[in-house]
Amino acid sequence: MADYGLSVTNNGGSVIISNTYKTMVFSERGSFRITSSFTDKGGQGSYVFAKPIRTQEPPQIFFGNLNGVHPKVSVYLTLLGGPSNWTGFVANSAIGGGNQLQNTYVEFVACKYSDSPNQNRFGMNQWDASGNIIFNSDDRIIRYTKFAKNWSFVTGQTVFTYRSNLALDGDDFVCISAFDRGVTWFIGFNFAGMTILDNGVPVLDITVNVPGGGNSYPYGANTSFCVPVCKFPAARYHN
């Protein structure tokens, strides 16, 4: 056990709250649309959080329940704000299948580390040795459902794909913010994103455009790169 924390066990498992390994908790749920003004250009959508997230660490953003006019959607995410003041995000997209303008409905869940104490008369707050809040009894802990961590590499003339081969359920949410399109093994590529819908079915693949340059990581198996997937039943994870 850590120097500061709490361990709770019941017949459903156990949860450890500690100052050593922080626990991800629910922050906000919402929806937005990704749209485009041209059929041959990328789409964009944005969202501003109801209140800023005050952690030093960036929040984690999960996408799910996509619905739109295109059967294939790839996205990458840019967080807005900065440490102690994360205010929202912008999602850029590329699509496949059809020449219609983009209009994709996306549901998201924002998660964070605990950033404020419980202000109610009854409850519990936990701090670390520096006086930083690590948990309060109003926090709703995130439980990961599965992880994509064994990738297969598929080459192509114009697109390279890293397939997770992970079976997704209709109510699964993929952690879009786990992937940063600026990682150094994408050399000379002008688009790198996470494909989360293909043939109208939820998937978890990484897709990169190949205009030239090269690829210094042409592998997939035996990598430690990991993307979490969660379920967020609305009865528990709601605003």
Image (cartoon, rainbow, N blue to C red):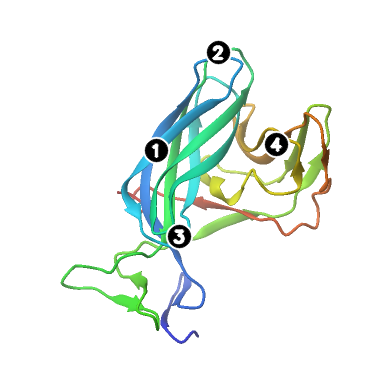
Helix, strand or loop under label 3: loop
Residue designated by label 1: 47
Residue 175 in view of the camera? no
> Where is residue 129 drawn, in percent x and y?
40, 84
- The vertical placement of 50 against 189, above or below, is below
* Residue corresponding to mark 2: 100
Judged from the image, the secondary structure of the residue bearing numbered disc 1 is: strand
Judged left or right of residue 147, residue 115 is left
Marks 4 and 3, the one that precedes in the sequence? 3
Label 3 crowd (10 A; few <14 / some 14-19 / many >=20):
some
Residue that mark 3 sits on: 142
The reply to whether residue 224 is visible in this rendering is yes
Front of the two marks 4 and 3: 4
The image position of residue 166, as x and y in percent, is 67, 47
Mark 1 and mark 4 in contact? Answer it, CB < 8 Å.
no
Element under label 2? loop
Question: What residue lies at 34% left-to-right and 77% top-to-bottom?
Answer: 126
Secondary structure under the numbered disc 4 in the rendered image: strand
Q: Amino acid at mark 3?
A: Ile
